[in-house]
Amino acid sequence: MHINAHGGGILLHRGTYYWFGEHKTEGRGGNQAHVGVHCYSSKDLYNWKDEGIALKVSDDPESMIADGCILERPKVIYNPKTRKFVMWFHLEPKGKGYSGAMVGIAQASKVTGPFTFIRATRATPQMWPVDVKPFHKIPKEGEIWKDRANLSAGEHPDSVNTLGRDFLPGQHSRDMTLFVDDDGKAYHICSSESNSVIHIAELTDDFLDFSGKYVRAFVGDRMEAPAVFKKDGLYYFMGSECTGWRPNPAHAAVAPSIWGPWTQTGNPCVDADSETTYHSQSTFFLPVAGKEGAFIYMGDRWRPENAIDGRYIWLPVEFEEGRLILRWRDEWDLSVFDK
């Protein structure tokens, strides 16, 4: 069975894995959302069942998720307090290119949906991060204040105060992921400030909004495609450089807290094709049920000229001296985690 769930994430719920991802269509037009978020389920990660479309795009042209919008990297988490499944995704309104830099939020009572779209928003509007500096609160005028998608080469985000620029409307949120910690707290992690800074933001207890607490990480490093997991009390991060659809060397980091400080550990890929992250871009780290400390790297091989032909790579995560390591394997199975 072909799985059409790109830029996805997997939720383990009551012993079943649920894979949510972008449903792509043929041609370049498939890079926009014409169907929605697809869901597949599995008991063992080998055999998958098609659960249908969990969130459909709207045929209402005025909807924020109208057919033809950009809907990327959907992630679903479960809230045991509300007993609801919550989906967040990167959203760009139809016809606006990547100028919106928003998140979409949806909710469902059943894991496979249907999810109901709740709202779209910029990240943390009118909220300052815990590591805000006094100069961030001083507006700058002129050309540098314009809402550009990316900064010029060598231009530092603080030199043009991207944080202050977006204080009122809310911060950029493009490539994103969700992470739920051991204590049940959930976090939204995204590429922000014209793709020059990673923002890590705590969510409210119902997972439907930002609590107001967030930090800036990797300031000026220009990373996207964030993926995060936790092992033995340490937090691991992986992201990619910003080169559009073209693969590039990955960046990994580790921290004692979700808030940091983050120590970069270099490219986690160590074999041939490591400079292209094995021709992939990170989307999610999947914890393997029943195998303590076992994680699977999930990456996408984007093919923008024919979006539906994009492929996936899964690799077992290894660790060496506190570093996240990915080695290429032509084939493998879950028994690698038994060694």
Image: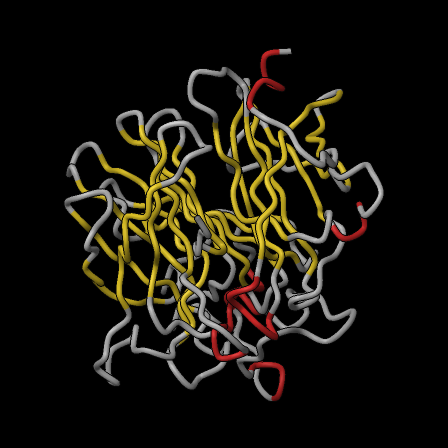
**Is 129 on the left-hand or right-hand side of 318?**
left
- Between 159 and 223, the residue placed more toward the observer is 223
Please provide percent x and percent y for residue 90: 42, 62
Q: Residue at x 36, y 34 (%)?
A: 42
Q: Residue at x 47, y 25 (%)?
A: 288
Please provide percent x and percent y for residue 48: 39, 39
Q: Residue at x 29, y 31 (%)?
A: 13
- Number of residue marks: 0
Please provide percent x and percent y for residue 283: 54, 49
Quadrant in the rendering for residue 14: top left
Residue farthest along the right direction in this orientation: 272
**Is 27 on the left-hand or right-hand side of 210?**
right
Q: Residue at x 72, y 76 (%)?
A: 152
**Is 247 on the left-hand or right-hand side of 24?**
right
**Is 171 on the left-hand or right-hand side of 142?**
left
Please provide percent x and percent y for residue 78: 27, 38
Image quadrant where one finds the C terminus: top right
Above or below for 328 versus 91 = above
- Between 198 and 329, the residue placed more toward the observer is 329
- Between 195 and 270, the residue placed more toward the observer is 270
Above or below for 119 versus 180 = below
Residue farthest along the top direction in this orientation: 339
Q: How is the image coloured?
A: secondary structure
